[in-house]
Amino acid sequence: MAQITDVTEEYKNNANPEEGILAFEDGYEHSSHMDEIETARWLYKTFGGNLILLKESQRQGVKTADYLWNDRLWERKGISSSKYGTIDLRIRKAYGQIMEKRGGIVLDFSACRLRMEKIISYITKSLKERAHGQTDVIIKHGSSYIVLRAKK
């Protein structure tokens, strides 16, 4: 089982808001990825760094990640369901999309009615079983966020 640690303060302390680059990979389809673009802007404004939005494609039947952030792959998943099974499935799919150069997962619960405590409980349970190596997970809920690190 993986060890889960809250690293929110580490992210806050190392943040350089709006420093670095925010760019799009050649051929990026803007109109069909508005949620990914909005999250990328939030990441850049909150943490900074070099953030490239990746065009959608598939490699060996698996969708590529949404971002290359500080030379690591990150996947964004919007979650509106309050069911553990659905949340766990989204995390499992996200892991598959970042395996090549693992960075992390952004889980956006802004459209979900669950309280942050319950969200954290579900995410922790899923990460304990699904973690591979070290992965950071940013849990965004409205204007608040926390960052968990899963390490196996």
Image (spheres, helix red, strand yellow):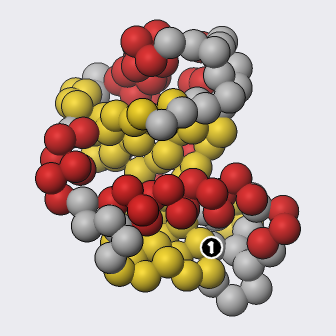
User: Does 84 appear above or below 12?
Assistant: above
Badge 1 crowding class, 10 Å Cα cut-off, few under 14, some 14 to 19, many 20 or more, is many
- Residue at the (40%, 28%) spot, across then down: 127
Residue at 29% over, 23% down: 1
Determine the image quadrant of residue 67: bottom right
Tell me the residue at 57%/24% (across/down): 88
Lateral position of residue 31 relative to residue 104, left or right: right
Q: Quadrant location of the C terminus? A: top left
- Place residue 85 in its image quadrant: top right
Determine whether, in the image, residue 151 is placed left or right of residue 108.
left
> Does residue 34 appear left or right of residue 14 in this picture?
right
Q: Which residue is mark 1?
A: 54
The reply to whether residue 134 is visible in this rendering is yes
Figure check: 59 above or below 80: below
Q: Identify which residue is drawn at 51% across, 31% down.
A: 141
Question: Residue 16: x and y, percent?
Answer: 25, 67
Along the viewing direction, whichever of 71 and 12 lies nearer the viewer: 12
Could you tell me which secondary element the residue under label 1 belongs to?
Answer: loop
Q: Is residue 122 visible?
A: no
Q: In the image, residue 117 lies at what x, y percent?
A: 40, 12
Q: How many marks?
A: 1
- The answer to whether 27 appears left or right of 43 in the picture is right
Q: Nearer the viewer, residue 74 or 145?
A: 145
Q: Amino acid at mark 1?
A: Leu
**Where is 124 relative to 105, above or below?**
above
Residue nearer the viewer, 50 or 101: 50
Task: Give residue 80's position: percent from left, percent from top.
Answer: 70, 26
